[in-house]
Amino acid sequence: MRLAALLSATAIAFAMPAVAVSAQEVDRVAINRIIDQGFNHSEVMETAAYLTDRIGGRMTNSPQMRQAEAWTAQRFRDWGLSNVRADPFEFGRGWSVVRASARMTEPRVLDLRVIPVAWTPGTNGVISGDVVVAPMTSAGDFGQWRGKLRGKIVMVTRPDTGGEPTEAPFRRWTAEELRNPETYRQPTHAAPSLDRLRETEFALRLDAFLAEEGALAWVRMSAREGGLLHGTGYTFRVGATPTVPGLELAAEDYRRLARLAKTDAAPKLELMSEVRFHDEDVNAYNILADIPGTDRSGEYVMAGAHLDSWAASDGAADNAAGSAVIMEAARILRAMGVRPKRTIRFALWNGEEQGLLGSLAYVDKYVATRGPLGDPDLDALPANRTWRSRWPIQPREGYGDLVAYFNLDNGSGKIRGVNAEGNVAAAPIFEDWLEPFASMGASTVSLRTSGGTDHVYMQTVGIPGYQFIQDPLDYGSRLHHTSIDSYDHLRAEDLRQAAVILASFLLNAANSDEPLPRMPMPTQPRPSDPFAY
């Protein structure tokens, strides 16, 4: 999940008016059984440990991700779920890190903290060279560095002075924060910038410039303090692989080099990056599994979390936590032997970290697609780049079958409520569903919209898709995409609570007499400011 989206997903309670919607009766006897199974017989931490300690970071199409795909599918089968399948969509190249190192050799010897940038090539052994601090954020910056980079290791981030944290890194929402009313935010719309969609990705333009100039490698500064590393990169498409090695240095190490570069003791670096590309199969796979419904003629409810992660650590909070909760909810309901009216489908998405690609592929294939833009160059771009600009929405045959989708992707924190995503008709129903869990800390229903994760494309075509509100813990402060996102930061009590609530929501949605109310089918909006230039 993207960090900016996490901030928008920290929803605050909205004061709900009375709405003329009949409440769905909650089966509290079934909830008692869910609580028993989820708290007294939980397997959620064993699942999380296997995904993190045993498999590790799960980059899309990497060998670790292939192992995770196979293992999670088998666990669903072991628990007795039906129609377990790996559903393919086109992605691109696999990539994995073997090892990497960095060392300053002049003016003194010092080991540095480093990680390769995803989908950049290795160094083919140890390389050594002088550094040049050449900040570049757009193609307009290239001119001032032309002719100055040959044989150099190029530091492409503008160094800053850093800063110390002013808030505790670990926190839970207080009762006051969850009670504080939040004014409804009207959506804003503007005409899409087709010129911006046509722009070539800067990462590839930078790579071409550095290769032309004869640079040995490039390094960037980590976006976080405290020695944390990320290694995120997005040049995964076949035929669009960089040729110059790229690495990320810890912020403190990067700034030291930058300071020395302004003295008469300019630094020299040794770099080594050994990586592997995996081209055996360009498809990525969503893992899907069902508890079959007994009636309702093909209708289903769905819960999902993304299984993929970055490679800097084990992808625990982002998002083995959510994946383990999805799997645990499936195990709970299957162990209870439930026979829901509607089918309950569980999804472990792939390619979320590269742009919600797995959930978008599912929507595009089974739920609804969008009309082409009519420009061959734009229509050739990846779907996630142009999706919101394409009209009209064209429902597929199964559009009406998917009646609700629930998503987990805010780390290891306990569920404190749910974002109703502006759906005033669904909000009072969620209040009823949460009532049995108020003593567990979950009672907030917010009308705020949340973004940046796999319910988004459901919402864009009118499917009721919802993200739960979770305690932030240290997700945004130090775990999100970083080198310390390991099992140690997961909270067992929180994950057990989340699995119990998710299982309850799914059973309520599957058995309710009426499906959750939908928002109107989206149509092309008028610009919020019709006079904007």
Image: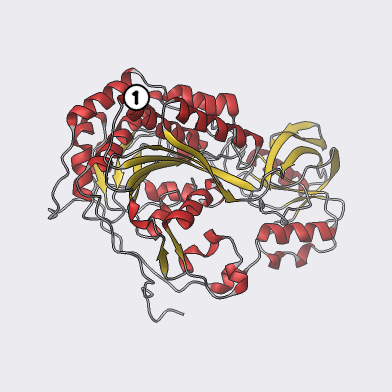
Q: What is the x, y in percent for residue 365?
A: 48, 55
Which residue is located at x 56 percent, y 24 percent? Answer: 53
The answer to whether residue 353 is left or right of residue 291 is: right
Q: Position of residue 237 (x, y in %)?
A: 67, 54
Q: Is residue 412 left or right of residue 18?
A: right
Identify the residue at the far top of this view.
40
Quarter where residue 266 is shown: top right
Q: Residues within 10 Å of mark 1 (few under 14, many from 20)?
A: some
Name the secondary structure under disc 1: helix
Image side of residue 262 versus residue 162, left or right: right
Q: Quadrant of residue 458?
A: bottom left
Name the residue that disc number 1 marks. Answer: 335
Q: Residue at (55%, 28%) from the top-left corner?
A: 52
Q: Is residue 3 visible?
A: yes
**Horizontal and vertical percent position of residue 309:** 56, 39
Asked whether residue 165 appears in the rendered view, the answer is no
Q: Nearer the viewer, residue 275 or 513?
A: 513
Mark 1 belongs to which amino acid? Ala
Looking at this view, is 204 or 114 the one in front? 204
The colour scheme applied to this rendered structure is: secondary structure
Instruction: Give the x, y percent position of residue 315.
Output: 54, 34
- Identify which residue, 344 or 314, lies in the foreground: 344
The total of numbered circles placed on residues is: 1
| Residue at image location 40% in from the left, 50% down from the top | 455
Q: Is residue 392 above or below residue 292?
A: below
